[in-house]
Structure formats: C-alpha cells, structure tokens
Image (spheres, rainbow, N blue to C red):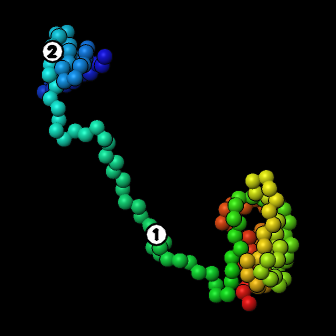
Amino acid sequence: MHKFKFNIRGNNYEVDVKKLEGNKAKVEVNGTCYEVELQKDATASKTPILRRSSVKHPEGADKIKKVAEGKFKVKAPLPGNILQIFVKEGDEVKKGDKILQYEAMKMENDMMAEKDGKVSAIKVAVGDSVLQDDLLMLLELK
C-alpha cells in the first residue's frame, strides 16, 4: 500500500503499510509483520484550515480619486477597438451627442456624451484597442 523510511535515534526503519481498515493496520517493519491499532488524534480535523497573510493596501487606496474640478472622464464600458471618432479637441458637445464608435464583442457601439461640455482631450485614436475602464477622452463641464 505505502512504503516509508524512518530514522529514529540513529536507527533506520523501513515500514510497509500492507492493510488499513478503520483504526487497525497491518505493517511490516524491517521484514517483521505487526498488527497495530491507530489512535485518533483529537485535534486532527478533516477540513483543512487556510491561513492567508493579511493584504497590504497602499497608502490612500481607500480614498476616492477626483478628476480636476470641472472635468468628466469618458471611459470604455467594455474592451474593444476604436472605429471612429466624431469629435475633435475643442468641440462643444451636448448630452446625447455621438462622440465615438467602437467595436466590442463583435458589435459596433456608439458612445454618446453623458454630459454637456467641451472636449478638452482625446486619449485614443482610430484603430486603438482599449480595455474596460480605459480613459477615452476628457470633457470640460459647463
């Protein structure tokens, strides 16, 4: 069944567990067979206990980061590719205006402006691949 080698106080022992039923075992130690009774350890548990080290958070990780006053971040809702950009820096947009088109999950999606404002920075170009929550552009709010 299982073979083990032990060294106890300088003596070597080869133990071969032949049969194990309940708390009785037949073992062969250095060629001699023995029938032994196993004692149940009261502290042993069948359920393993997971021990994890505590998670270290960088200083200020629990604080909400604000964008500069009067700015609104336009972020990618899903990973995809930029197909078209309908605005340029300096353009005025109103809530609901189409600002860009991107492909995500094999579908073309139009992104609309969520707020009125002026396009202050475009952070992507046509053909760029973006991940979820990547910054696409910044709007200066009115």
Whole-percent x, y for residue 51 in the image: 33, 51
Between 81 and 116, the residue placed more toward the observer is: 116
Residue type at the position of mark 1:
Pro
Residue that label 2 marks: 35
Please rate how many residues cluster around mark 2, counting C-alpha atoms within 10 Å: few if below 14, some from 14 to 19, many from 20. few
Whichever of labels 1 and 2 marks the residue nearer the N terminus, that label is 2
Q: Is residue 20 above or below residue 81?
A: above
Secondary structure beneath dot 1 equals: loop
Quadrant of the rendered image containing residue 74: bottom right
Residue at 66% x, 66% y: name it. 133
Q: Residue furthest front?
A: 96
Q: Residue furthest bottom?
A: 142
Quadrant of the rendered image containing residue 129: bottom right
Side of 48 where 109 appears, left or right: right
Side of 73 where 48 appears, left or right: left
Q: Is residue 35 above or below residue 132?
A: above
Q: Is residue 31 above or below residue 139?
A: above
Name the image quarter holding the C terminus. bottom right
Whole-percent x, y for residue 131 in the image: 69, 60
Side of 56 where 120 appears, left or right: right
How many discs mark residues in the rendered view? 2
Residue type at the position of mark 2:
Glu
Label 1 to label 2, Cα distance in Å?
A: 59 Å
Residue at 56% x, 78% y: name it. 65
Q: Is residue 122 visible?
A: no
Name the image quarter holding the N terminus. top left
Foreground mark, 1 or 2? 2
Between 108 and 121, the residue placed more toward the observer is: 108
Residue at 20% x, 18% y: name it. 25
Please rate how many residues cluster around mark 1, counting C-alpha atoms within 10 Å: few if below 14, some from 14 to 19, many from 20. few
Between 62 and 11, the residue placed more toward the observer is: 62
Q: Which mark is residue 58?
A: 1
